[in-house]
Image (cartoon, rainbow, N blue to C red):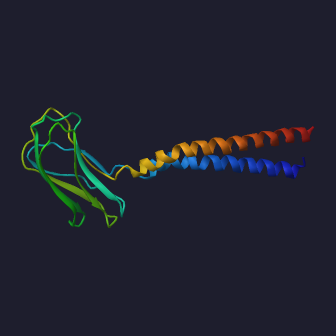
């Protein structure tokens, strides 16, 4: 094998290894680039008004607002609140209310918003009455559905198989190239 053929073989081997690794790296980094959670804050369910810090969302993505507890609530726990999401200028992006007996739940879907601008927003929650229930830490979250994570998880097995096939083929070609280089040097 000539030096030129050997260089072409080695270059092709490195190309195959890159083709195998790039999709795998992309799938592994996908959740880091596409933030899955925009806001998460503890929300004491005592009578009063609570205002979150500003949070950012991506334009054109629907976000779900929800409330969850780390423990199941009693069957007769009653929750009454209203909420609205405002952007920096005070424009209402979404609003809703909850007036319900929980029935041993540990989470509630409050509603959704879709950002039409890339500006920051915050949520204002008015709790109309104290929520009696077990000592739990209610968590208010505003996040997109787990589509990004589902995409990454769905492509992960294919990316691993792709990496195995292309990296093994590239590795074999690289070993042949190195063996030929060593044989040519002698």
Image quarter for residue 111? bottom left
Across and down, in percent, residue 127 comes to 11, 49
Q: Residue at x 77, y 43 (%)?
A: 173
Q: Residue at x 32, y 67 (%)?
A: 116
Answer yes or no: is residue 56 visible. no
Answer yes or no: is residue 118 visible. yes
Residue 84, compared with residue 107, is above or below; it is below
Which quadrant holds the C terminus?
top right
Q: Residue at x 42, y 47 (%)?
A: 149
Relative placement, left or right, of 33 versus 19 is: left
Furthest-right residue in this view: 186
Relative placement, left or right, of 53 versus 35 is: left
The total number of labels drawn is 0
Relative placement, left or right, of 136 versus 182 is: left
Residue 142, compared with residue 88, is above or below; it is above
Relative placement, left or right, of 10 versus 97 is: right
């Amino acid at each position: 094998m000539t030096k030129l053929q050997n260089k072409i073989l080695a270059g092709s081997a490195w190309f195959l290894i890159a083709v195998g690794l790039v999709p795998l790296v992309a799938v592994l980094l996908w959740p880091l680039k596409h933030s899955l959670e925009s806001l998460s804050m503890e929300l004491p369910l005592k009578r009063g008004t609570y205002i979150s810090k500003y949070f950012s969302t991506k334009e054109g993505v629907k976000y779900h607002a929800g409330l969850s507890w780390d423990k199941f609530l009693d069957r007769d726990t009653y929750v009454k609140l209203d909420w609205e999401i405002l952007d920096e200028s005070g424009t209402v992006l979404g609003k809703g209310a909850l007036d319900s007996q929980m029935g041993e739940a540990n989470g509630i879907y409050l509603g959704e918003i879709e950002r039409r601008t890339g500006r920051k927003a915050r949520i204002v929650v008015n709790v109309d009455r104290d929520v009696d229930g077990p000592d739990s830490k209610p968590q208010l979250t505003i996040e997109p559905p787990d589509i990004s994570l589902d995409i990454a998880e769905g492509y992960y097995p294919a990316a691993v198989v792709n990496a195995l096939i292309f990296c093994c083929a590239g590795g074999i070609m690289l070993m042949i190239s190195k063996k030929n280089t060593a044989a040519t040097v002698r």
